[in-house]
Image: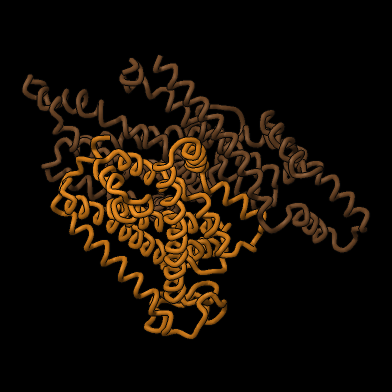
Amino acid sequence: MKLAQYIVQRVFAYFLVLFVGITITFFLPRLMPGDPINNYISQVQARAGQSLSAEAVQQLRDSLAELYGLQGNLFTQYINYLKRVVRLDFGPSFTYYPEPVSEILLESMPWTAGLLLTTTLLSWLIGNGIGLIAGYYNKRRAAAVLEFIGIVLYPIPYYILALVVILILAYWLGLFPLSPTFLPGPISWNKVVSILYNSFLPALTLVLAGFGWNVLSMKALAIATKEDSYVQFARLKGTTDRTRMVNYVFRNAMLPQITALVLSLGFIFNGALQTEIIFSYPGLGMTMRAAAGAGDYNLLYGSIVITILSVATAALVLDLIYPLFDPRIRLGR
Amino acid sequence: MSAQIKRRKLPKLNARLSIGLTIVILLTVSSLILPFFTSVNPAAQGTYLKNLPPSPKHPLGTNALGQDIFWYLVFSVRNSLLLGVAVSIGITAISTFLGLSAGFIGGWYERIVVVFMDTFITIPVLPVLIVLGAIVRGNTSFVVVAAILIVFGWAWNARTVRSMALSLREREFINMARFSGAGALAIIAREIFPYVYAYMVVNFINTILFAINTEAALAVIGLSNVVVPTLGSIIFWALNYNAIMIGQPLWIIAPIVTTVLLFLGLFLTSTGYNELFAERRGVA
């Protein structure tokens, strides 16, 4: 009963967050100075010299307004926008006209999703594993060393980590390419290898970035949890250190860590975008950067909706599997 | 989350605070005072010969734009810090107000605030900033960047403040004050504020980190106002002119080292202060 209530609550909150988020991204740019259509027209004029007549400009303006969904008053625009979002139809891209935005996004999403899923999972597992050991054996010298590494890594921003990784591993040691080149064509063994090889540095950056926080917070949680009476009881029962550490301390200490992961998904996504752009990795980040440079607003809008959608969905999925780890919710106590 | 209550005393924590404060004060004071000793605008291009090696006159050399790298860096640190502090003041004010009021008023008001909080925590800031940056196209004034950071950054802090308010609401000493006839404002000022201000200091510092980081990230990819020297724009130009390939590695290494130092300093200060306060409160 309690579980059903929990799930309904989460799903309801999910749709509410999506709705509010998409509404904000609709209205906020309209509060900003600057007009995308004027920008675009001045671009076209610059390219065409002064050869465009006033009528041609007006025609261009009308067709652009239609393409952008900028006809009618603010309210009809908003309703049209919501309809487009529901159908995931963001119109054609300007830079790759007439390719629809949704197709471009479909090409870049797997790159970002693959990179993010692997690295988030890896850095959560490795970071928490190391944090657990450092917290459980917090009297040992090695624990202090691990904590030191966590402290130094945690506050460093993604783009700095990315640059340091490039400088050291690609530039000075020459182990990896400075910018990735992926083999074109159908999936083959060589292609898979080249993807893994070229994705290694961005992946390393993301793992390192998430690592520090996980180590530090897991260590603090493990130290606090191992003093709890049920862990002491388990010790008196004669369980091994390993059993207590994994089945007693970790089982409990991981719950706040899952919650923390849900809350930091947006932040991790930011980091992935930065990292992709610095490494020229062909995911959503690069797509957004290119679209921003070219003033391709349909593509930008599409990307931001997809971003909100994926972060919110990832959070929902984590929320929904949370009861598997927390019997208090599963069993309704 | 029992871990938060049972924060443990660690002996080296005051070391953290002192190291952190030393770094932060050193960087802040020097970046605020040094600009008075130069009459040259560090962002002006072609002031000096290009790509000079480090010398007594140019401690870090000059870059491919004919700017002195050292002075550009000094102004970058100052601007980034000013932006960080300004954004943090805005965010702290908004989040404290919304968090406390949501926690204490409750009801529909709280529900609405929580929905917005959840939304703003979920929406990643960077894509929004990229879109807005593309719309205003190079006219992104520094003030606009700061305003957007405030609009998209308040939620995390408000969440912490609200959960604090929720736990405080039920405490005995609050009831005690209420029964003795204290008004809501008096309770917030005299009973709650002393309790939450340490967290506010920690949040304040962390928000400075958030603001500097986000602006710099935006600048590195060329979508903030890269004409203003900041810790991000200096890296943007260095990357654009391939600082390493043209033999001016200091152009990119100096800002990287400075950023790491500043962030480490701020982080150590915030965690060190947190632990110090936990000790004093006797929860340690």
Instruction: Establish if A15 lies above or below A33.
Output: above
In the displayed structure image, the side of residue A290 where residue A242 appears, left or right: left
Quick one: quadrant of the C terminus of chain A? top left
Closer-to-camera residue (A1/B24): A1
In the displayed structure image, the side of residue B249 where residue A313 appears, left or right: right
Residue A4 x, y percent position in the rendering: 44, 16
Quick one: quadrant of the N terminus of chain A? top left
Residue drawn at x 42%, y 54% as measured from the top left: B210
The colour assigned to chain B within the rendered structure? orange
Residue A51 x, y percent position in the rendering: 90, 60
Instruction: Establish if A188 lies above or below A56.
Output: above
Closer-to-camera residue (B95/A172): B95
The colour assigned to chain A within the rendered structure? brown
Identify the coloring: by chain
Residue A16 x, y percent position in the rendering: 55, 32
- Residue A47 seen: yes
Residue drawn at x 53%, y 49% as measured from the top left: B126
